[in-house]
Amino acid sequence: MISPPALPLAAALALAGLGASASTAQPNPGNPAQIEWQTVGRIEMARTETTVAQFRRYVQATQAVTQAERQGGGEVYESGWVKKPGWTWRTPMGGGHAAADDEPAVHITHPEAQAFCRWAGARLPTDAEWLAAAYTEQRETPAAPFVRGKTYPYPSGDSPLGAQCLGDCGPQAAARAQSHGARLWRGAGPARVSSTPAGVNGLHDMGANAWEWVDEPQAAPRDTPRRTRGGSWWYGAAQMKAEHLQSKPPDTAVVYIGFRCARGG
């Protein structure tokens, strides 16, 4: 599979950060984003990737403006990185076509994801937490066909079927895809987060759909590349596996990177 090169760091990240509203957003110990939490071992993990509706609640509360919005649009890889005017979390594939409330929020940088989770009374999961939640079933009485204590090759279980990936996840992936009329160079688009089967630990889309930012490496300098996990609709099943490592500059804002929050531990 194609592995896009790293994006260059934007000068705006160092100079302006997230803007005053995002960087000063105060944590809320309640559940202002209305995240549905799932207990996984000693932590709670969001059952789905952060949705457009959840991110909108954050923006309405903090007046945050994302980097993609400030810069006129996010990016996608098309034989090289291409900036797409108007592609933001609100209209992920431009054209004025608003995302559905239950689509994954994308075009979000690593610091923006951290700021959202902090406001939501949570945080980004560590890499180790993400891996444990994605591949090892920890529920006392998991739903069939999952078995407590078993470590699976994919977050979807023994096979990638049911996930939202390219080519390897079954014909339903193309049928679920939300492309908003865009002509994509590769892939068909993401699925609504509630439309895919729940996987290991009852979590949706830990494999494929959108890459997910994790807090790795922790406490690193601001411009250090950060890890993404799980693959996306732009890739096949290989990127869904635990051994696949990929990191990106923290100011990366593209159409197939999202995130989910964790709390506790």
Image (spheres, rainbow, N blue to C red):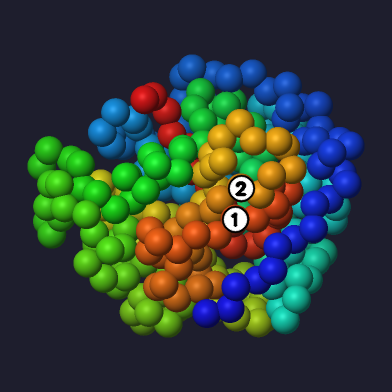
List the residue tagged with mark 1.
247
Q: Is residue 235 left or right of residue 140?
A: right
Bin the neighbour count of mark 2 within 10 Å (Cα to Cα): few under 14, some 14-19, many 20 and up.
many
Q: What residue type is labelled 2?
A: Arg
Which corner quadrant holds the C terminus?
top left
- Residue 21 drawn at (x, y percent): 77, 27
Name the quadrant containing residue 60.
top right
Q: In the image, what residue occupies the spot 40% across and 42% down?
A: 128
Above or below: residue 108 compared with residue 1: above
The answer, for residue 259, to whether it is visible in the render is yes
Name the quadrant containing residue 224.
top right
Bin the neighbour count of mark 1 within 10 Å (Cα to Cα): few under 14, some 14-19, many 20 and up.
some
Q: In the image, what residue occupies the spot 41% across and 72% down?
A: 238
- Residue 5 drawn at (x, y percent): 69, 68
* Disc 2 + disc 1, Cβ < 8 Å: yes
Q: In this view, does 224 lie to the left or right of 155?
A: right
